[in-house]
Amino acid sequence: MSKVLVLYYSSYGHVEALANAMAEGARSTGATVDVKRVPETAPEEVAKAAHFKLDQQAPVATVEDLANYDAIIVGTPTRFGRISSQMASFLDQAGGLWMRGALNGKVGGAFTSTGTQHGGQEVTLFSVIINLLHFGMTIVGLPYSHQGQMTVDEIVGGSPYGATTIAGTKGQRQPSAIELEGARYQGELTAKTANKLFG
């Protein structure tokens, strides 16, 4: 079976919750799955003053870790319609992996969180996906076979480009059952794809 990395950055725990659901879905296929986070780049006093969730259990990844996996699913909150600076900084350090083609042919995917329904989810997903395509990876999104993302009965995230959640402008909304199911679905599909290629 394949080895899957769920790599994320989360300030307040919303992307962390999606990351854990993504890992559940991937593990359901028999894949070996690790959940890791990228380093916090904000000064500690700034992070504490902003009430960042600093007690996350996932270990901190190194750039070289990426080469050890068959699939990498990347999660980041949206920052004004783009990837967070913490995740961007981490991926920017992967030039050595890119130079030697260490990620060519691996499977990748993206997931995100925004404060509002129209806060740039799809643009953020694409900003991750563009990075992964430059690394030579094959992208797996969240197809409409995950029917939950098509509901109009409640506020719900989700996009064909990846799982998402809507946190609320004050972070007051946690990922819903449908959003977590979307993350599990994408994780399962990504791992199944990697299992076919590498298993």
Image (cartoon, rainbow, N blue to C red):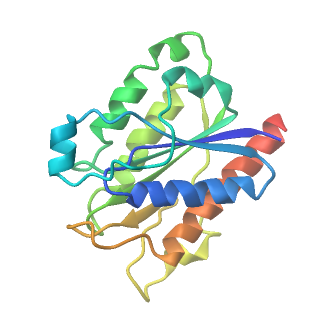
Give the percent coordinates (x, y) of residue 108.
Answer: 59, 40
User: Camera-side residue: 50 or 3?
Assistant: 50
Residue 14 image-quadrant placement = bottom left
Frontmost residue, 32 versus 183 = 32
Q: Is residue 37 toward the left or the right of residue 66 in the image?
A: left
In the image, is residue 27 above or below residue 32?
below
- Residue 144, picture quadrant: bottom right
Can residue 16 be seen here? The reply is yes
For the C terminus, give its image quadrant: top right
Q: Position of residue 71 (x, y in %)?
A: 65, 38
Q: Residue at x 68, y 45 (%)?
A: 33
- The mark tally for this picture is 0
| Residue for point 25% across, 48% down | 79
Q: Quadrant of the N terminus?
A: top right
Could you tell me if residue 142 is visible in this image?
no
Residue 42 in the image: state x and y as whole percent. Answer: 23, 36
Q: Residue 64: x, y in percent?
A: 55, 20
Residue 97 is left or right of residue 4, and the answer is left
The residue positioned farthest toward the bottom in the image shown: 153
* Residue 94, placed above or below residue 99: below
Question: Residue 102, relative to residue 20: is it above or below?
Answer: above
Residue drawn at (38%, 55%) of the image? 122
Q: Is residue 121 left or right of residue 140?
A: left
* Residue found at x 41% / y 45%: 126
Which quadrant of the figure has residue 47?
Answer: top left
